[in-house]
Image (spheres, rainbow, N blue to C red):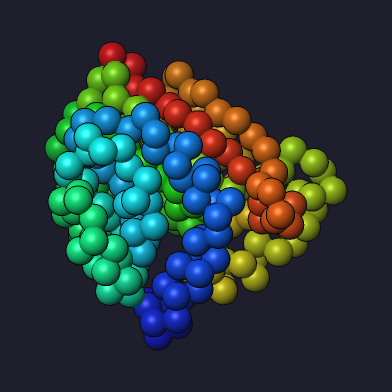
Amino acid sequence: MGFYSQRILPYLLDWSLSDPTMAQYRKEVLANVTGEVLEIGFGTGLNLSYYPENIDKLVAIDANPGVHALAQKRIQKSHITVDNRVLNGENLPMADNTFDSVVSTWTLCSIAKVEQALQEIYRVLKPGGKFFFVEHGLSHEPQVQVWQNRLTPLQKVIADGCHFNRNIKQLVEKQFDLVTVEEFYAEKTPKFVGYLYQGVATKAG
């Protein structure tokens, strides 16, 4: 990772993902998180204030070491004990059947081997465990898809691998049998970046 990815992009992500609309989606997706929790793509720690009160420990990973300074400020203010590690979601060192909940918010768009990462998420979940996610991705409208496909090569450069054109529902359903997902456009957001997938996937018990 270069200077831009580690020193500039973390501040851009923190600013762009701090929007009040995004905060509401975070609150909704995290409301039912329980037990031992793993967060993939912890970033600058924007989710911390939205976890339920009964969550007292969180294992958080992010592949970009540049976000950790910003995240540390939020960790110090949180009641949650955070085990914050520089790790890639494609290769998790945790044992099988470790976590009750795994969380991902605006992260699957930027993981290079996203299918492998989803396999890892499934593996580390306990039987009956749940994967909670809100992600942006491929719109259902063909005219929006055209722009998403055109702009993704540029977006990958300026946003550290982010794709506008991933069908998150299909990707999750390849790994999980039981998936509940809503698809909609985020409020006050351009359609090409604001098509969201918000849902829960459950590992077979």
Residue 185 vs residue 60: left or right? Answer: right
Q: How many circles with numbers are drawn on the protein?
A: 0
Residue 43 vs residue 60: left or right? Answer: right
Residue 17 % position (x, y)? 51, 60
Looking at this rendering, what residue extends furthest in the bottom direction?
Answer: 3
* Residue at the spot 23% in from the left edge and 61% down from the top edge: 77
Looking at this rendering, what residue extends furthest in the right direction?
Answer: 143
* Residue at the spot 34% in from the left edge and 22% down from the top edge: 203
Q: Is residue 192 visible?
A: no
Residue 22 vs residue 132: left or right? Answer: right
Residue 158 to residue 29: above or below: below
Which of the 4 quarters of the picture holds residue 85? bottom left
Residue 119 % position (x, y)? 35, 36
Q: Quadrant of the N terminus?
A: bottom left
Residue 205 % position (x, y)? 28, 14
Residue 152 % position (x, y)? 65, 62
Q: Which is more toward the observer, 111 or 186?
A: 186
* Residue at the spot 25% in from the left edge and 20% down from the top edge: 127
* Residue at the spot 34% in from the left edge and 59% down from the top edge: 45
Residue 144 to residue 103: above or below: below
Q: Which is more toward the observer, 148 or 56?
A: 56
Q: Is residue 145 visible?
A: yes
Residue 146 vs residue 69: left or right? Answer: right
